[in-house]
Amino acid sequence: MRKNIIAGNWKMNKTVEEAVELANAIKLELADCKDVDVVLCPPFTALKAVSDVISETLINVGSQNMSSEDEGAYTGEISHTMLKELFVRYVILGHSERREYYKETDFWINKKVKKALDKNLRPILCVGEKLEDREAGSTESVVEVQVREGLKDIPVSAYTELVIAYEPVWAIGTGKTATSEQAQEVHAFIRSIVKDMVGAEAADAVRIQYGGSMKPGNAPELLAQPDIDGGLIGGAALDATSFAGIVKAGM
Ligand code: PGA
């Protein structure tokens, strides 16, 4: 049985003060949540403050990116050591906004996934097709390349740690959610790719989140699908009540 994992991707929102307020409100609702893994991913500047707020709870902290390098002359980058010092457990990698606006490629994303695993951080690898891909009937081929390249040379033992997030780009921040059937279809497809890559046991164990306009209203149906093991939440994660509502739907 896979445990649902619900992560809030706060993106470039929340000053430290605002982040503390939001984390405190989420803590009131979810401090003892055992049935679902809960992860808060604030911007780098608020990681320390959010870690402090949730330190005595079962809530985890994640970052929204990480350097593929250990240290040195990489202006503007943040390393695994710096993240772990702030009690970060998860790292979102290859989000579509980073692929699109910062030209991150599968090659670099794979380097980051490997580095994260090597340093005992849990990657959340994001994959997903754009609207034009879906309309051209290439959803599966696009997602397959992202999964195969992003997880290239990852040992089979890591599949219990890493998380895949299927996020159709056309559903992110648009209010358009994939229907639960559309999402389930791609999730099952991703699981079949993992099976082909590393075998049935790892494919059964790996958790695959859905992301893209997930809200308390549509979460129960999405999370009821056999291959959907949680959510990566953007907009609705900025409000404690809606985020908690989604987590509760996953219990
Ligand atoms: P959204 O974002 O929930 O606002 O669509 C999801 C994401 O980008 O991770």
Image: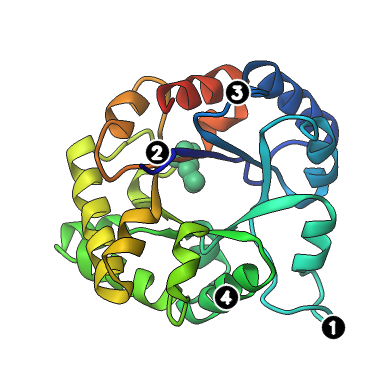
Kindly report the distance in space between the C-alpha atoms of the residues bearing marks 4 and 3: 32 Å
Earlier along the polypeptide chain: callout 4 or callout 1? 1
- Residue 50 position, x and y percent, is 79, 37
- The residue under label 3 is 239
Q: Secondary structure at mark 2?
A: loop
Specify few, some or many for label 3: CA neighbours under 10 Å numbering under 14, 14-19, or 20 or more: some
Q: CA distance from mark 2 to mark 4?
A: 31 Å
Q: Which residue occupies 28% across, 70% down?
A: 199
**Camera-side mark, 4 or 1:** 4
| Helix, strand or loop for disc 1 | loop
| Residue 119 in view (yes/no) | yes
In the displayed structure, would residue 193 be above or below residue 225? below
Q: Amino acid at mark 3?
A: Asp
At horizontal 27% and vertical 40% (from top left) the residue drawn is 178
Q: Position of residue 248 (x, y in %)?
A: 47, 21
Binning the other alpha carbons within 10 Å of mark 2 as few (below 14), some (14 to 19) or many (20 upward) gives: few
Residue 129 visible (yes or no): no
